Amino acid sequence: MSFDEFKPLNEKSLIQYIKATPALSSRLGDKYDDLVIKEVGDGNLNFVFIVIGSTGSLVIKQALPYIRCIGESWPMTKERAYFEATTLRKHGALSPDHVPEVYHFDRTMALIGMRYLEPPHIILRKGLVAGIQYPFLAEHMADYMAKTLFFTSLLYHDTTEHKRAVTEFCGNVELCRLTEQVVFSDPYRVSTFNRWTSPYLDDDAKAVREDSALKLEIAELKSMFCERAQALIHGDLHTGSVMVTQDSTQVIDPEFSFYGPMGFDIGAYLGNLILAFFAQDGHATEGNDRKEYKQWILRTIEQTWNMFNKRFIALWDQNKDGPGEAYLADIYNNTEVMQLVQEKYMRNLFHDSLGFGAAKMIRRIVGVAHVEDFESIKDDKQRAVCERKALEFGKMLLKERRKFKCIGEVVSAIQQQS
């Protein structure tokens, strides 16, 4: 069987593909008799195969030329696999402890072969629904975000290298357009794709569509998302794109990656933690009211930003005499001016992150794609109560984000809303 043109793989053809690909077959010790293959692509877009043998394991991810959860009626470029593989490699080089290794990429087949994150790794979102605490999560995510965002920005790159990289990732336009639609447009208009917990949130969804102040803010964020090539961002950094154990944190699925605003990654991640917080009451039982767990989530939110902020500034200080052209050393040449620059930069980034986080919260409640945190709450009425609190907080945060001076103030506001 030849693989010189695109064809979707099944379990049988996948084995033939692996046999024909030394970078993959060597991972399995060239043994095929006892292979266990499981298709686990429960996402919206791709085939994902876990391949386990007696001498090794790997994951194969193949992009389809349409949105899997909708079908061929919504075409989607399979070129996204190229951007995903490229970003996994770039981010993996910058943060090797928190990005799975890529073994093989085939552009024709839109296929990535990579490290299998073996059990007990689970999707972070599932861990949050289950009420599991992860002691290193804040530290690991802060480190991942600080390194991937700093080292792909003009704080580290010269403008020539930066523009070259931006140009390369401009090709991921289709997935950017998908984000533009589902995050910044559809929730604020009547769209056939939108859904919410009806009838309980009918008025809430209508209120979003009629809120002029909200529309002014979302327009500003959409403009920033489309126009600001700040760093190579993951582009879809929610709690479903992170796999965890008690001591491991791995970021996966950067197929939405492009050069965009740093705050979009930070906000997506923090916004999803806030959603997890508001969902906890729906998962409380007689034996576990989830109060302690809610406090852990709030601590994690606060620690993530504070550790990120500290780590990012440290990287900046270490590299201030490097090739980065954003702030030239012979201009920003004393401690005082450098401190002013850094404070302003981080304040703006903080407010960007809050805005994007709020936008991601709103779209998960009244837009097309929802989150398991809420969806797994069986009782519609109870789910709607949790979602409404999150929605109200998201709307407030989007409109008033510039009033917050530190993440501690945001955490206090979350507690008041709950």
Image (cartoon, rainbow, N blue to C red):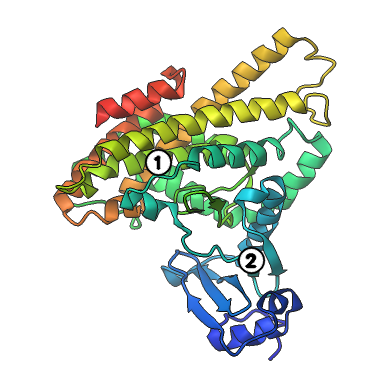
Whether residue 293 is visible: yes
| Dots 1, 2 in contact, CB < 8 A | no
The label number, if any, that marks residue 413 in the structure image: none
- Quadrant, the N terminus: bottom right
Q: How many marks?
A: 2
Residue 105 position within the rendered picture, expressed as x and y whole percent measured from the top left: 70, 68
Could you say which quadrant of the image residue 208 lies in?
A: top left
Q: Which of disc 2 and disc 1 is earlier in sequence?
A: 2
Give the amino acid type for the residue marked by disc 1 in the picture. Leu
Q: Position of residue 270 (x, y in %)?
A: 45, 38
Q: Which residue is mark 1?
A: 273
- Residue drawn 73% across and 30% down? 155
Camera-side residue: 290 or 63?
290
In-front residue for pair 252/297: 297
| Element carrying mark 2 | strand
Looking at the image, residue 14 sits to the left or right of residue 162; the answer is: left
Please state which amino acid type lies under the numbered disc 2.
Answer: Met
Residue depicted at 37% across the width and 33% down the height: 298
Q: Is residue 340 left or right of residue 211?
A: right
Tell me the residue that label 2 is attached to. 114
Counting other residues with Cα less than 10 Å from the Cα at mark 1, is it few (<14), some (14-19), or many (20 or more)?
Answer: many
Quadrant hosting residue 51? bottom right
**Whether residue 220 can be seen here:** no
Residue 139 in the image: x percent, y percent? Answer: 54, 37
Helix, strand or loop under label 1: helix
Q: Residue at x 28, y 37 (%)?
A: 292
